[in-house]
Image (tube, helix red, strand yellow):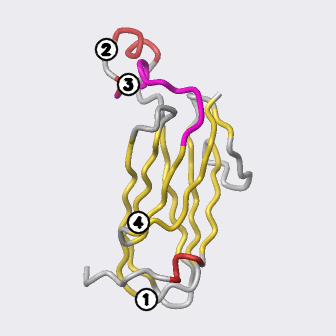
Amino acid sequence: MGSAIPVHSLAQQHVAYMYKNDNRSTPVTRFSPADTIGLCLVLKDLPEGDYAFHADWYNADGKLQETSRHRFTKQPGRAEIIAAELKMIKASPIRRMFSTTETTGYHMKFYGKWRVKLFLNGKEIAGKNFEVK
């Protein structure tokens, strides 16, 4: 890919919403630990070029839980739609029962208020709060 285009006021031209379990037609902000938490970002009026997107997912303790990354090249004449997802439970119920790590999603603190921060070319452009109950 070529060089990335700096993002300045273009970051204001976006729509971001959250959804669960592949149901992008219904925005939500409340999830259960078993849900797949989705984020849809629609970027409008970006100039053509190469971009790097990432989403930092912060758990209820305020610690970085996971990062989603996506590189794309903006094509002329269309909005760019990016989806990022977070799965809290990454293993089967049996495996979680016998696991001692947080990566399986068993010992992680699920419940509470979470936050996701959205970045384009390293600049924060948006953030969303959501709750896990």
Q: Residue at the location (56% across, 86% down)?
A: 45
Quadrant location, the N terminus: bottom left
Q: Position of residue 114 (x, y in %)?
A: 55, 40
Residue 128 is situated, as x and y percent measured from the top left of the image, at: 59, 53
Q: Earlier in the sequence, mark 4 or mark 3?
A: 4
Q: Position of residue 67 (x, y in %)?
A: 38, 49
Residue 10 in magenta stretch: no
Q: Which mark is residue 48?
A: 1
Q: CA distance from mark 4 to mark 2?
A: 32 Å
Q: Identify which amino acid the numbered label 3 is placed on.
A: Thr
Query: What is the secondary structure assignment of the residue under circle 4?
Result: strand
**What residue sits right under mark 2 in the picture?**
100
Q: Which residue is mark 3?
A: 104
Q: Give the class, few, some or many, for how many residues have Cα within 10 Å of label 2's Cα (few <14, many ≥20).
A: few
Closest to the observer, 98 or 15: 15
Q: Is residue 66 above or below residue 46?
A: above
Marks 4,2: beta carbons within 8 A: no
Task: Find residue 53 and name its label.
Answer: 4
Furthest-right residue in this view: 26
Please tell me whether mark 1 sits on a helix, a strand or a loop.
Answer: loop
Kind of residue at disc 1? Glu
What is the C-alpha distance between the residues marked 4 and 3? 26 Å
Do the numbered discs 3 and 1 sit on residues whose CB atoms are within 8 Å? no
Residue drawn 66% across the image and 54% down it: 24
Q: Is residue 115 above or below residue 52?
A: above
How far apart are the alpha carbons under marks 2 and 3?
8 Å
Residue type at mark 2: give it.
Answer: Thr
Q: Quadrant of the C terminus?
A: top right
Q: Earlier in the sequence, mark 2 or mark 1?
A: 1
- The stretch of residues the image draws in magenta is 103-114
